[in-house]
Image (cartoon, helix red, strand yellow):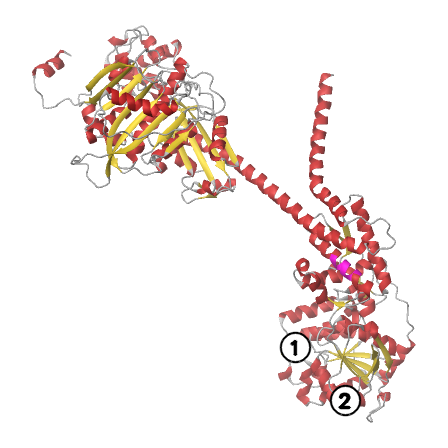
Amino acid sequence: MKRNRDNIETSNFEKLNQLKKELKEKKRSNFSSPSGAVIVEELPAEEVHKKIHLTAREVLNQIKNKIPPVLSIPQRSGDNIIYDEESDLLLLGGKKSSRALLSLATSLDVTRTMRVLEIIHTLVEKDIHATKREIFYNDVNLFIDQVNSDKIIDDIPPLLNTTRDSTHIVASAKGMAIGRLVIEDSGDVIDLTKLGSGGWSITPFLDKIKIVESDAEFILVVEKDAALIRLSEAKWWNKYPCIIITGKGSADIATRSFLRKLVKTLKIPAFALMDSDPYGYYIYSVYLRGSKRLSYESPFLATPELKLLGVLSRDLDSYKIPKECWLKMSDTDIKRAKELLKEPFVQKNKKWVEDLKLMITLKRKAEIQALSSHGFEFLTNTYLPQKLSTGDWI
Amino acid sequence: MEKVKIMTSNQEGVIKEGSIAQFMRKRTQLVGFSIERHKHTQYVAEFLDNALDAIETAQWEFNVFKNLSTEPPNINYRVEPWDNTLNKTKPEAILSRLNKILSPLKDLINKEPVALIILQKVEKPEILPDDIQGSDIEMYCFEAFDNGVGMHPVDAEKFGIYLASSKSEKLKQTRGSQGFGAPSAFSDAQNTTGKPITVITKQVKEKKGILQVFYTTGENKKKYTLPSTQISTPFNHGTYVQLWYLNVKYVKGYADEYVKQSALLNSHVNLIFVDPNGEVWLYPRKVSKFPPEPVYTEPHPESTSIGDFQEAIRNTPMLKITEFLTKSFCRIGEKRAEEIVRLSNKSLKSKISPSMQVKSLTDEQINALYKAFISIKYPAPPVNTVVPVGSDVLIDVLKKSLNADFVEAVTRKPTSSKGLAFVVEAAIAYDPNKPELSENSVLYRFTNRTPKLRDNSDCAIWKAASSVNWKNYKIDRSDNGLPKGPVKLFVNVSGPFVHVMFKAQSKQALAADDILVKEIKLALEELGRKLKAHITKHEIEIRKKERSEKLLSHAKLFTKSLTAIIDTDKELTEKPSQEELYNIIQEMVTGRKMSAKIQSSFIKAKDKVTQLTLKSY
């Protein structure tokens, strides 16, 4: 990688360096799941294949012994999500629901579950991947709506105690990455500084990606495409050596997984730049802790090291964002903010609590683009450098 | 008395004594004989009802139909029209006609109860009476035959005379009662065509039958064009009537409907009706037993008016008051009779005694006696005077005639109102797979087994049926309150009661007596509950079936996926086929319920055995 740095040295960003140091020193503690939680692990195809066979054998024995067939599936409802303080992650609890073939309420669900198992079985056997959409089209008559097959697809990994990736079903990835990073994707070496203004589309087949090298000092996760375009146009990573990622709104599995992989491998700090509203904060929280829907996979998707850089509610005052750029919070916004406040992982972070409370009190929000009220280059030249150099993050 | 005699014999008064015959001859419409399509039905009804009464009498009194087979007889009927060239009043012509219409029935005529009615259009006269004009007026020949009891020659002389009825004096559960039907029919026939009436009859016990052709007159007498002549009849017993009348064109759906409905509740008789289009409506009997004969009973005090009472006193052959009271009415014994006398003396200056002669009572004393007579509480009248069709027969007949999935019938306990006993029975037929049940009327009304086609909503039966909340019984309700959908209701009110309860002489609608309406409602509600249970059971069955169908369709896919996975399992030695697995599950779905049922009945049986053994110890 050819270094083409501008004259800005991030080396005198004290706080950033400190954070970097902490990360490097932090020993990778072995993740141990709390008792009762569903433990999942990444498994090679043949292991998944075996596990499906074990499940099938169990059902086969039930039928042979004239017991009405039942599959016990870990519940993914809200009351079965637990926050594990030690690992600082959202995890799936031990509650299970029975899907009986001979009950009208569950017979269709269990039939669909068995069908998805059959499809996954074929995928891992042939070592190929399929998207959720493809699974749906595999048996439209049975699934009727993709919502139904998607639901089952999310049920299977905890049933087999493995990750979604291991089931060879990939979510279509919409995330982008650009900046000081060289990767190898299916044998092709790609330099993420040499992609013009577009950036690299994060692939769902992350097991095929190898990180070759990077001299980035930090990673910047931006909520939306617009911010990435702004930074990419300025070739901002040349001035401030970094990798920029966006999930284009709420992040999909591949984007989150990619972020996690970068942080774990490169051991550099990561910062999030979101809209100054509850939804932006929520998106940040999903990068940070994982979503509730896929809580069992949190250990493989979440990046607890991610810091919230902006746009903080207090920034609207400290950076004198004009009132015309403020937006009034809707009832849904306030509700969402209050829900966030209740989350244990939010409560653990006092600064975050303060900022959320400020947001709720002032009932105002703003988009990242509001910073442009001070000129298009305010974000790249003033806001971000200032925030990073002063360590003004949460 | 003397005075009256002088007045009628010696002086010409202004007030002329009219006769019932003169009155009725001009007012045949009062009993349903006006020029309209219903008149055809009226003829059919009058003579069919008479035929059924005659057949029942023959059976009850002489047991003429012995060993009726349980299988209905095989009847084929075809008849040729009258030969227009024949001189129809000649005895030979009439007899040859009778032989012709009976020849298809010759094997049955002395074995099976048969009522036959033939109605045909004949060439109309060139000149019509002034009061009957219109292009659609036609002449009809009406013939009715039954192999019932037949008439004794003496009775035959009176047949056709107003109020000469074998039934009107006694209150008995019969179809007709008044002696208005046949005479009115004869009057109408003569009034419209000027043609005489022909009657051939042979009573069971008589050696020979008689043939007569006659007119009835305003003096309520018969004027013979052919006086009663002894003849040999082609039947052992029965009656044949032939007459001609003018009316509007016959339309299907009325007279035939009357016969059809009559057949439903008189399934012990074979009914044949040939309509003017030559269509034969054949209803072979469906049961082999006749209903029992209703018992005659004396009037009950509660049903006796002051007029009835005075009339009874005038006509009684009894001498003493107590004798008169105990013999003329039911539910009055010695003690009650004496109490009535004692009570009447309370308001009388010239006292009466129980042994006093009835004929010597003054008007004042009669009135006092009546007041006392009705002031006492009596037990209800005996109920053996009423004979219902019976729910078993109703169910059997309706099942055979309508072929509906659900048929139920209810016969209430006999009860009484106003001193007259009656019994209500009702039947229901329901089948959602038979759309024809949704057509035509919902409610079929009968009194003493006789269909009532007119004055529907004016009748107590209608009122009771429309006051039932059918929605409670899982069936839709029309705006008129009757049930809606693939359902038919039948209500029959039997007993001497009904004769008193008719709203008019045409006997089409029953007055809404409270007890009567309540009884009908209770009967219909009971049917409603049975229907609801049936519908619910049906719904559960459908749900069960849907459930197992759904589960099995899932099981098919489930086992298909399962076997697809298992097939690649190298460590598994025994790999059952999809079919094997599906069969096991199918057994679980369809067999499990059954085994549970068997199990519970087994436990019940076991419990019974234990109980029995315990008892015997």
Which chain does the residue under circle 1 lie in?
A
Left or right: B252 as drawn, with respect to B585: left
Image quarter (top left, top right, bottom left or bottom right) of the C terminus of chain A? bottom right
Query: Can residue A38 be seen by looking at this rendering?
Result: no
**B430 drawn magenta:** no
Magenta residues, dominant SS class: helix
Which residue corresponds to mark 1?
Answer: A364
Q: Which region is colored magenta?
A: A115-121
Q: Residue furthest left?
A: B11
Q: Could you tell me residue A314's position as x and y percent?
A: 72, 80
Disc nearer the start of the sequence (1/2): 2
Above or below, B24 relative to B372: below
* Of the pair A346 and A186, the residue shown nearer to us: A186
At mark 1, the secondary structure is strand
Tell me the number on the disc at residue A235: 2
Q: Could you tell me residue A35's position as x and y percent?
A: 86, 58
